[in-house]
Image (cartoon, rainbow, N blue to C red):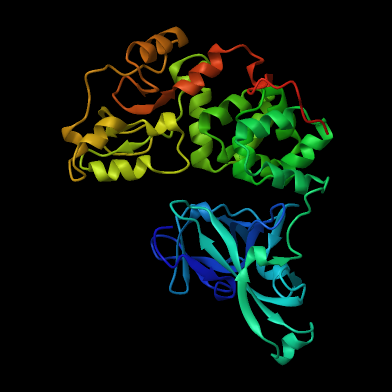
Amino acid sequence: MASGPSRVFVSHLAGVAVFDPNGDQVGRVRDLVAMLRVGRRPPRLLGLVVEVVSRRRIFLPMTRVTGVDSGQVITTGVVNMRRFEQRPTERLVLGELLDRRVTLVETGEEVTVLDVAIQQLPARRDWEVDKVFVRKGKAGALRRRTGETLTVEWSAVSGFSLEEDGQGAESLVATFERLRPADVAGVLHHLSPKRRAEVAAALDDDRLADVLEELPEDDQVEILGKLKEERAADVLEAMDPDDAADLLSELPEEDKERLLTLMRPDDAADVRRLMSYEERTAGGLMTTEPIVLRPDATVADALARVRQQDLSPALAAQVYVCRPPDETPTGKYLGTIHFQRLLRDPPFTLVSSIVDNDLAPLSPDAQLPVITSYLAAYNLVAAPVVDEGGSLLGAVTVDDVLDHLLPDDWRERDLHGSEEATHG
């Protein structure tokens, strides 16, 4: 969110209109969804509950919000219209946190929560609940508007957050927050199936998608099978298309088609295209979401795309210059620019003037040995995949190649050399 104030009190967002980039109203904000953390760490804001024209309430992730300004919310225009369902780790900010009685840590005095403020973290898209506006006095004083009011840090009050020794899935998920997806997957793998399903149900879609990508196939299939079908489709949409395609290929044909039908058409189309290639080929290994730029883009444009937080290091290592359309399959592929080259040229330089087209791209039918030799010979962490017509189909990254070169059970090994495992 580049625009708008960095801190907003949530009472100012109640009923605010939500617009898409074209200025068309999507709906109105009815609540905000936050995830509590262990101890007194500020909750992370996950998204907004938006009431659309049909009066259906949907969930709008903060990652889909580009601005909160002048009494309105601006979205990317990509909105999932499925009905909002609250999960165990989630709290409704307006509905559950306001009017709540909490305690000031310093004095032990009970106060009433009148409002809370959210703030965007520096250089990130994440938002936190960081301030609490409270009124001193007895609970009934709220209606009489008596008692001193003050704004304090979230950590200055108690009565909100999860207990450190909690044993439910809610508390376990909170302890996972600072772990990398691969480490969460390692813990999840060693839990009992029942416990694993509870934790998976409590994770938000994006986090569960990241963790699923790091789990062995058997665990992936088991967890996906225990989710409601609409939730399973949401998680598949949040996964990288190549990982979603690999997971769906492990399911019976009937289940696969049902989930693909529930997915957004654009996401399903990417996954279907990947599933049409053999598994150990460039087409089967590639991601369909590399960084694509038009010839008239500048180095500054390229660096802005590279800085996106959600990109893996391998995908951020280079950009691909193509004629429109920008989505894969693109127009004519013109070449690649490596990140280091972007750092050496002035921001106003056109990418078309520094593109590297000396290396022939991979064909979608290139086999795994050809791909590994290509990456090793040219010291690359990613490679373009281009069809016979010259369109960029995607990019193969070194992490996906390694996934197919390592032993089948490599995900089950302890990355840190420890023999300890967590059991549910």
- Total marks placed: 0
> Is 400 left, or right, of 91 in this rendering?
left
Instruction: State which quarter of the image contains the C terminus.
Output: top right
Residue reaching furthest to the front:
106
Compared to residue 411, the image places residue 24 above or below, namely below
Closer to us: 289 or 415: 415
Q: Quadrant of residue 294?
A: top left
Q: Quadrant of residue 414?
A: top right
> Is 237 left, or right, of 339 in this rendering?
right
Asked whether residue 50 is in view, the answer is no
Compared to residue 186, the image places residue 164 above or below, namely below
- Residue at position x 28%, y 24% from top? 390
Compared to residue 235, the image places residue 193 above or below, namely above
- Residue at position x 78%, y 37% from top? 197
Instruction: State which quarter of the image contains the N terminus.
Output: bottom left
- Residue at position x 62%, y 79% from top? 150
- Residue at position x 79%, y 53% from top? 163
Question: Residue 194, image x and y in percent?
Answer: 83, 35
Asked whether residue 395 is in view, the answer is yes
Question: Residue 106, image x and y in percent?
Answer: 71, 70
Closer to us: 10 or 297: 10
> Is 88 left, or right, of 134 in this rendering?
right
Q: Quadrant of residue 142?
A: bottom right
Question: Residue 354, image x and y in percent?
Answer: 19, 31
Closer to us: 312 or 103: 103
Question: Residue 94, image x and y in percent?
Answer: 66, 70
Closer to us: 307 or 162: 162
> Is 224 left, or right, of 293 in this rendering?
right
